[in-house]
């Protein structure tokens, strides 16, 4: 290989590097942050689902499920990964 062949690959390598730092890396960070948020869900947190429903977490179940109360007496089971946002966190109980 001569230098002209290597010079042809330099723009491709630069494009890939730019795509990695501008697209792929931020997406991976966002996914990791979402997984941390979902893992930290606890009873009493007010959440928004990806469908736009706002409710309070009543119970965190096994199998990646959360029971969310949307209104008085209206409870739904939601897959944890469909929680889009936590509006308000409950404070952990103080050990006194």
Image (cartoon, helix red, strand yellow):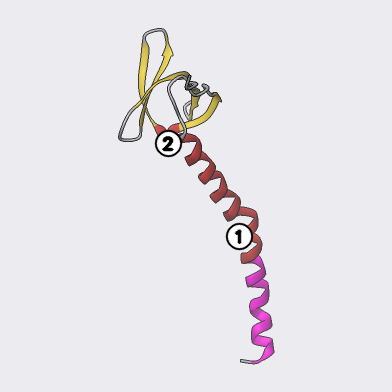
What's the residue at 53%, 27% (across, down)?
86
Left or right of 28? Residue 18 is right
**In this rendering, does residue 53 appear at all?**
no
Q: Position of residue 95 (x, y in %)?
A: 47, 22
Residue 6 magenta: yes
Q: CA distance from mark 1 to mark 2?
A: 25 Å
Q: Quadrant of the N terminus?
A: bottom right
Residue 92, numbered circle: none
Q: Position of residue 65 (x, y in %)?
A: 35, 30
Question: Magenta residues: mostly which secondary structure?
Answer: helix
Asked if 94 appears above or below 2 in the picture, the reply is: above
Query: Which stretch appears magenta?
Result: 2-15
> Dot 2: what SS?
helix
> Dot 1: what SS?
helix
Query: Counting residues from the N terminus, which is met first, the one under dot 1 or under dot 2?
Result: 1
- Looking at the rendering, which quadrant does residue 8 occupy? bottom right
For the residue pair 78 and 90, the one nearer the viewer reads as 90
For the residue pair 92 and 30, the one nearer the viewer reads as 92
**In this rendering, does residue 89 appear at all?**
yes
Circle 1 sits on which residue?
20
Residue 81, numbered circle: 2
Q: Residue furthest top?
A: 72
Q: Position of residue 34 (x, y in %)?
A: 51, 39
Asked if 11 appears above or below 82 in the picture, the reply is: below
Q: Residues within 10 Å of mark 2 (few under 14, many from 20)?
A: some
Left or right of 79? Residue 52 is right
What's the residue at 50%, 25% (across, down)?
48
């Amino acid at each position: 290989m001569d230098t002209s062949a290597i010079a042809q690959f330099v723009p491709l390598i630069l494009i890939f590097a730019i795509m990695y730092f501008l697209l792929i890396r931020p997406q991976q960070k966002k996914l990791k942050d979402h997984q941390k948020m979902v893992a930290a869900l606890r009873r009493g947190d007010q959440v928004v689902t990806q469908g736009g429903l706002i409710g309070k977490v009543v119970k965190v179940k096994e199998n990646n499920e959360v029971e969310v109360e949307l209104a008085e007496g209206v409870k739904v089971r939601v897959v944890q990964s469909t929680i889009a946002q936590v509006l308000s966190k409950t404070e952990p109980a103080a050990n006194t």
